[in-house]
Image (cartoon, helix red, strand yellow):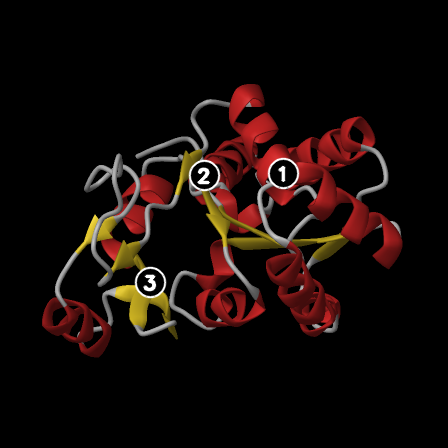
Amino acid sequence: MADRRGLLIILSSPSGAGKSTLAKRLRSWDPSIEFSVSATTRNPRPGETDGQDYHFITTDAFKTAVSEGNMLEHAHVFGNFYGSPKGPVKAAIDGGRDVLFDIDWQGAQQIRNSDLGQHTLSIFLLPPSIGELRRRLESRAQDDAATITRRMEKSWDEISHWGSYDHVLINDNLDTTELQLKTIITATRLRRIQQPHLMDHVRGLQSEFEDLS
């Protein structure tokens, strides 16, 4: 058995708040943190690899996995299903490895309500201002004006659920936020429930104490 149980680290934010950059920094800090590879019913795009970018499965297989309780969370988006397979995540945390989820508040809620929810650490990233959020989206030069407008319209719905997360950070400085994330993760790894050997250690202390009497 591993020295500790892994964490299900949920990182959520509106688009443009720095989530992807910080997720990469966390992986650089601790390469043992795994990204959760989602399953989807959509077709692979050019350059995507099955099992690395997504698990590409049929709609029937996806629905079966949901009905059998093998998806930690799932959603129907633009005509396709997306979800987080439970098996690989459970194997990782049982092996003492953390799994990082880049999902929205609905997925976060489903995972917290699952039978692995007690091992969840959820963190929401807020932008310093709405103006700064738009500036970041525009500076990425990845989306056209219409897409940026849609992302901005969606951002408030996402921000409105900040209160359901364990920790909320205002990302006005990437280096500061990165340090805060590392501190939160390090501390949460020491939660009692994440340390399966504590009970045996306490029993050993009790036995030693009884031997003294």
Q: Is residue 13 above or below residue 30?
A: below
- Sequence-wise first label, 2 or 1: 2
Residue under the image location 78 percent in, 51 percent down: 133
- Mark 2–mark 1 Cα distance, whole angstroms, equals 10 Å
Q: Which residue is disc 3 drawn over?
A: 83
Label 1 is placed on what type of residue?
A: Ile
Q: In which quarter of the image is the C terminus?
A: top right
- Sequence-wise first label, 2 or 3: 3
- Mark 1–mark 3 Cα distance, whole angstroms, equals 24 Å
Q: Which residue is disc 1 drawn over?
A: 185
Left or right? Give the position of 39 relative to 122.
left
Residue under the image location 35 percent in, 64 percent down: 72
Q: Is residue 47 above or below residue 37?
A: above
Label 2 is placed on what type of residue?
A: Asp
Instruction: Give the x, y percent position of residue 41.
Output: 22, 63
Numbered disc 2: secondary structure: loop
